Structure formats: structure tokens, C-alpha cells
Amino acid sequence: MSRATPSPLRLAVTGGRGRLAALLADYLRVHEVTLFSRGGGAGFQDLAGLEAALPGHQALLHLAWSTLPATSEQGGGPEWQDDLPALEKILGAIAALPEKSRPHFVFFSTGGAVYGNAPGRPNLETDVCRPIGQYGRAKRAAEEIIERHAAQHGLSCTILRISNPYGYPVPKSRLQGIIPHALRCAAEGQPLTLWGDGHAQKDFLYYTDFLSAVESVVARRLTGTFNLSAGESHTVREVIALVEKHTGRKITLNFQPAPAWDVRDSRLDNRRLTAAAGWRPLVSLDEGVRRAAAGYSGH
């Protein structure tokens, strides 16, 4: 699917030091993108000044979040002290602007964590969310804040329930991302620690498909809640087999008990987004792992 040439927009992106924000800024470079991060500096605007900078921006992509699923559990839920109050403040600032000056607000939520385990079929956006971990509960609380502000003030808001993007470098210390960690273990000949028996299944979305979906959402100013996913799930063992196939190396597995908050069955129906955005994922898991393996250099 070829990319259309959109009219340039002014876009604000929070979580600017995160890898996904950097990828988005590069992918959306036809637009004027300003990255916001806590503390600012080194080419980033200070997140504390975001509200004052909102006028003149057509969209705000809100990726800033203080935790991952594992760190949320370890840290006792800092989202409730930091992320959720900050979200309330941002939405209040948008609501205070004249209606025609309000940016389109796009929130990057989570797929599997916010739904909990799938009900024997892929989750639809209309399903009741039953998060089983602190991270999913906090993200769902954020969604409820957004839904309330959108209804009360007529804000243009989008919630993207994202699956598991991959295909880009992540730090070795990051407690997330089976594919990059499997690639690292294959390259270094190190054992890979797995939670559970490897039969948990997840939806894995190649990062260029993630980027093109976000571009379509922004260009069309879509509103509502959408699953942003590949639309098919694979077990962790399938992922490992593909990494072994494309690296030509066997990975030794170290099994550990799965934490109670880890979603074992994550399946996301993406048909609502494909219909609304004129978008569809193009990179299969096999091809995505092949590309990731070919580009792996160790991180």
C-alpha cells in the first residue's frame, strides 16, 4: 500500500525519548513534529510546557507513560500519581481552547493488558475490559478519563489499543519484547528466560505497520477506540522457532513461572481500524522476524 502525500500538519508527540516516539517523528517528517519529554533539552521540549504549546497544533500524540507491565507491578502503580493526573491536566487544557483550535488527541493504550485474556475469540473494541494487572488497569483508567472528557467537552479523541510492536532496537534491560530478546540470545548464545511454558499467545505488529496505521489515523482525524494490531496471534514458541529459523541458531530456554498479571491469551480483532483507516498490516510475522534478524546488531 503506497503512502499518500498528506498536507503538512503541526504535531506534538509526548514521550519523546521513547523509541516509538522517535520512529513516529521520523516517519511523519513530512509534518512539523515537536517532541516533548520530561525535563526537555537535547532537542526535546519540556513536557511541563506542553499545555502552553498546544495552540497551533493539529494533533497531539500522547505516548508518555511511566511504566511497562512488569515495572508497574514492581513500582506499586506510579501511574496513579503521575500519568493519570497529567492526562487530566492535558485534556483540561485542550478543552479550554476555542473549539476550532483544539488538537486531535491520540492516546496510545494497550491491547492485551487492557482486555485481559481473550474470551475464546479475538477481542472487539465493544468487549468489556477485564485487565488482570496493574498496568492494564491504569491504562483502562486513562481511557475512561479520555472518554469522559470527550463526552463532556466534545473533544476529538482517539484511543489506540496497540498489540506488541517489534522490529526496532530495544535496550537489553527493557523488561518487554520477546522478539528482540530472543534475537539477542540467539546472537550471544545466551539462554532465554520465558514466563510460563511458551504457549502464551500474543499479537505481534511489525513497526512499519504500526507507523502507517498511526499516519492514517492522524490524516483522517479518526475518533473512537480502535485495536491497532496484526489481527492474528502466535505463541511464544512459534516466535522462538522463527527466530531460530532466521538466525540459524538454537536458543536454550530457561522456564520461569508466569506472573499472575501476564496475559496468556491475547487476540485482537483489527477490522474496525482497517475499515475506518483504509489501512491493513502488510508484514507477516515470518517476514517481520526475518527483517529483524537481518538488521540485528546487538543492543
Image: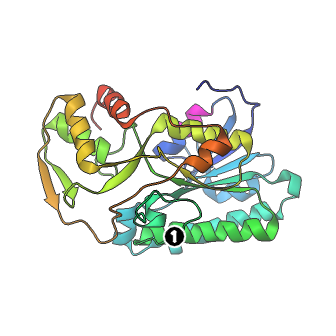
Which stretch did the figure color magenta? Answer: 23-28
Report the quarter where the C terminus lies: top left
**Location of residue 8 with respect to 14 vertically, above or below:** above
**Location of residue 182 with respect to 288 vertically, above or below:** below
Left or right: residue 221 versus residue 161 is right
Magenta stretch containing residue 225, yes or no? no
Dot 1 falls on a residue whose secondary structure is loop
Q: Residue at x 76, y 68 (%)?
A: 151
What's the residue type where badge 1 is placed?
A: Cys
- The extreme front residue here reads 120
Residue 86, image x, y percentages: 62, 67
Left or right: residue 286 versus residue 211 is left
Q: Is residue 228 visible?
A: yes
Residue 116, image x, y percentages: 42, 67
Name the residue tied to disc 1. 129
Report the quarter where the N terminus lies: top right
Magenta stretch prevailing secondary structure: helix
Q: Residue at x 56, y 72 (%)?
A: 141
Other-residue count near label 1 (Cα within 10 Å), few / some / many at <14 / 14–19 / ≥20 = many
Residue 189, image x, y percentages: 12, 38
Q: Residue at x 23, y 42 (%)?
A: 240
Left or right: residue 14 versus residue 288 is right
